[in-house]
Image (cartoon, rainbow, N blue to C red):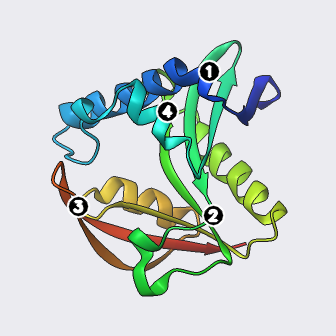
Amino acid sequence: MLQDLEIYEASPSQVEEVLSIWLEAAYWMQSKGIDQWRPEHFNRDVVLDYFTNRQIFLAKYKNEYVGSFAIQWSDPSVWGDLHNEESGYLHRFAVRRTQAGREFGSFFLAWIEDYVKSKDKRYLRLDCMAANEVLNTFYRSHGFTYKGTFDLSNGRISWRGSLYEKEL
């Protein structure tokens, strides 16, 4: 199966593909009462702006886009005093719901770990909604260590996040 999967860096010309995956994830979260990604916060301009200071990746399986994620090399606004330059920071990690249960998330994480390590970084870091126990459990089950919490409030959204790190 995985021989048919390709992961590559997206370009701004692929804004619609990225937006589609992020919106699908946001609508799904909303339907489950998870108030982390809100559909009204995603549009073409938001995605295009997200390309600034980040690498956005797309995953394609048998000619279908099945996931997306972003990596950035600095994240002091989330990590505060814990921020370091030895890490890659994962954001906007999403797998299409039609592909849930096929282990794509685990495969993507392994690929991301290898990619971040290839950039001479020592850690992979991420944050997720603290109240989403399923997601927190997923990251812990993949070897991530809980490092603390942060509170996000930017006028559009307010929530508490869990910080996770994995040594590579």
Give coordinates of residue 142: x percent, y percent: 57, 62
- Helix or strand or loop: what does disc 4 sit on? helix
Q: Is residue 1 visible?
A: no
Q: Are marks 3 and 1 in contact (CB under 8 Å)?
A: no
The residue beneath circle 3 is 131
> Residue 40's quadrant in the figure?
top left
Going by the numbered disc 1, the residue's amino acid type is Ser
Quick one: label 4 or label 3, which is nearer the N terminus? 4
Quadrant in the picture for the C terminus: bottom right
The residue beneath circle 1 is 13
Crowd tier of the residue under label 2, counting other residues whose Cα lies within 10 Å: few below 14, some 14–19, many 20 or above = some
Going by the numbered disc 4, the residue's amino acid type is Leu
From mark 4 to mark 3, how far is it between C-alphas? 29 Å
Quick one: label 4 or label 1, which is nearer the N terminus? 1
Quick one: label 2 or label 1, which is nearer the N terminus? 1
Quadrant in the picture for the N terminus: top right
From mark 4 to mark 2, how far is it between C-alphas? 18 Å
The residue beneath circle 2 is 73
Q: Is residue 42 left or right of residue 119?
A: left
Give coordinates of residue 63: x percent, y percent: 69, 12
Furthest residue in direction bottom, as rendered: 81
Q: In the image shown, does 157 or 155 lie closer to the viewer?
A: 155
Quick one: label 4 or label 2, which is nearer the N terminus? 4
Tell me the residue at 44%/25% (across/down).
19
> Residue 159's quadrant in the figure?
bottom left
From mark 3 to mark 2, how far is it between C-alphas? 26 Å
Q: In the rendered structure, find residue 48 and report the number of the disc placed on it.
A: 4
- Helix or strand or loop: what does disc 1 sit on? helix
Going by the numbered disc 2, the residue's amino acid type is Trp
